[in-house]
């Protein structure tokens, strides 16, 4: 694994890149709002992708690199993310078909920027459909705006809600809450199956 620091409009970000010489595609993943790239579901997803010969970059947003836990505003997250993805596509992940995603807040960023980054698929871990107890504040439009195949792996007990399936969107429920940590085997299975389909296309 290599660690790459990337300058963005909002300070340096960091990408933890794992790639084999036989990589068939690349998956760039972002972390949740208060967490980091060591979240269990992100690490399990990275390992699942590597098993499918998919290179993986786990991206730390600038606010996390700076040691802050409170996330930056959405427009800053999106701008930093697109800068990192552009760098990775030009250097470390050059010439590989690109998939993007992340957990929770990171999944939202990946959805909002999927068209700009040129992603061929989006992988969402624990997509926060709405704030807990506020289903009227739905973020479904962000998901619906994604025009490439999307996988949502969601805990069946997630207080942030469960997104519906869509024409291009597959939703897999696992027996867990928002952390997904109590059923990582199911997360890995869903990720490997979906990645296998995407790369075979």
Image (cartoon, grey):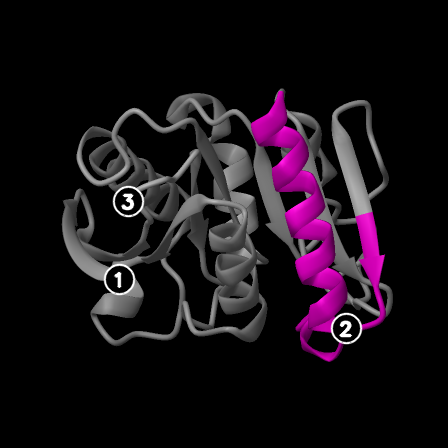
**Label 2 neighbourhood size at 10 Å, few (<14), some (14-19), many (20+)?**
some
The Cα–Cα distance between marks 1 and 2, rounded to whole angstroms, is 30 Å
Determine the main secondary structure of the stretch shown in magenta: helix
Read off the magenta span.
172-201
**Label 1 neighbourhood size at 10 Å, few (<14), some (14-19), many (20+)?**
few
Q: Which mark is residue 1?
A: 1
Residue annotated with mark 2: 177
Q: Which mark is residue 80?
A: 3
- The foreground one among 25 and 103 is 25
Above or below residue 162? Residue 159 is below
Above or below residue 70? Residue 140 is above
**Label 3 neighbourhood size at 10 Å, few (<14), some (14-19), many (20+)?**
many
- Of tags 2 and 3, the one toward the viewer is 2
Q: Is residue 74 magenta?
A: no
Could you say whether the residue bearing mark 2 is in a helix, strand or loop?
A: loop
Q: Is residue 183 magenta?
A: yes
Could you say whether the residue bearing mark 1 is in a helix, strand or loop?
A: loop
Of label 1 and label 2, which has the lower sequence position? 1
Residue 110 appears anywhere in the view: yes
Is the N terminus in the top left, top right, bottom left or bottom right quadrant? bottom left
Residue 180 in the image, given as x and y percentages of width and height: 70, 70
- Of tags 1 and 3, the one toward the viewer is 1
Q: Are marks 1 and 2 in contact (CB under 8 Å)?
A: no
- The foreground one among 135 and 61 is 61
Residue 174 in the image, given as x and y percentages of width and height: 82, 63
The Cα–Cα distance between marks 1 and 3, rounded to whole angstroms, is 22 Å
Residue 162 appears anywhere in the view: no
């Amino acid at each position: 694994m290599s660690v790459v620091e990337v300058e963005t409009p909002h300070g340096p970000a960091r990408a933890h890149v794992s790639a084999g010489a036989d990589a068939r595609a690349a998956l760039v993943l972002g972390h949740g709002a208060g967490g980091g790239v060591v979240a269990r579901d992100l690490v399990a997803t990275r390992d699942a992708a590597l098993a499918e010969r998919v290179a993986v970059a786990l991206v730390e947003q600038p606010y996390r690199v700076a040691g802050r836990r409170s996330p930056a505003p959405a427009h800053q997250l999106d701008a930093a993310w697109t800068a990192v993805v552009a760098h990775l596509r030009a250097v470390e992940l050059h010439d590989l078909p690109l998939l993007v995603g992340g957990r929770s807040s990171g999944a939202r960023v990946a959805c909002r920027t999927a068209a700009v980054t040129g992603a061929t698929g989006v992988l969402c871990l624990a997509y926060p459909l709405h704030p807990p107890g506020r289903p009227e504040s739905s973020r479904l439009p962000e998901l619906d705006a994604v025009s490439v195949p999307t996988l949502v792996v969601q805990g069946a007990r997630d207080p942030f809600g469960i997104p519906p399936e869509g024409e291009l969107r597959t939703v897999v429920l696992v027996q867990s809450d928002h952390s997904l940590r109590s059923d990582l085997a199911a997360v890995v299975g869903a990720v490997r199956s979906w990645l296998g389909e995407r790369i075979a296309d």
